[in-house]
Amino acid sequence: MKTVRILLWLPLVAFLAILGLVSSGLLKPHDTTVVSQMVGKPLPAFTLASARTGEGAVTGKGFADGRPRLLNIFGSWCVPCIAEAPQLMALKQAGVTIEGIAVRDRPGDVGEFLQRNGDPYDRIGLDDQAVLQVALGSSGVPESFLIDGKGIIRAQHIGEIRPEDVPGLIETLKAIR
């Protein structure tokens, strides 16, 4: 008789155990952020054609000129990139040097994007096959990297830059000179 009672309660106990496991996963989901393994390492060697006509190529060597800067990976086709445009303009107005890498894009589309949303970039390279994006360990657009004056990647910002992120990025850039 005791065995029958235990067997009657077993499905309920199993159900509650499964419910507990599922709800714990919902309350504290896994972090699926892909963090670049390049943080703390030099930028990979690269040469990209400029997205602007009449400008020279953008190279990795150009990042080792003693000036820290923000390297912004974006696309003219990217909706979150539009959302971060005002924050990039605020960073530029605060004196931050910003270099852009347009991923899977065309010069004409980049030009239209900049006309609509503002142009905070000192230079923009075209990464039409996303080769540099992959080499940087970037998982998507927009994404930004803080580069010190020696060309070393010091920090990564995944996703669009929001207004509350601007002061921290400025402080980090001041600290990595």
Image (cartoon, rainbow, N blue to C red):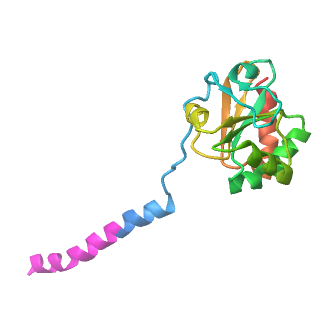
Magenta segment includes 154: no
Residue 14 lies in the magenta stretch: yes
Residue 22: percent from the left, percent from the top? 40, 65
Quarter of the image where the N terminus is located: bottom left
Which quadrant of the view contains residue 42?
Answer: top right
**Residue 111's spot in the image, x, y percent?**
80, 46
Question: Which residue is located at x 82 percent, y 47 percent?
Answer: 114
Q: Residue at x 63, y 44 (%)?
A: 104
Q: Position of residue 18 (x, y in %)?
A: 33, 67
- Figure quadrant of residue 151: top right
| Residue at x-position 15% and y-position 80% | 5
**Which stretch appears magenta?**
1-18
Q: Is residue 91 left or right of residue 143?
A: right
Give me the residue at 30% from left, 73% from top: 15
Pinpoint residue 121: horizontal percent, then vertical percent: 82, 38
Q: Quadrant of residue 173?
A: top right
Number of numbered discs visible in the structure rendering: 0
User: Horizontal placement of 61 versus 85: left or right?
Assistant: left
Which sits in the foreground, 78 or 147?
Answer: 78
Quadrant occupied by the C terminus: top right
Image position of 6 with respect to 146: above or below: below
Q: Image check: 18 left or right of 106?
A: left
Name the dominant secondary structure of the magenta segment. Answer: helix
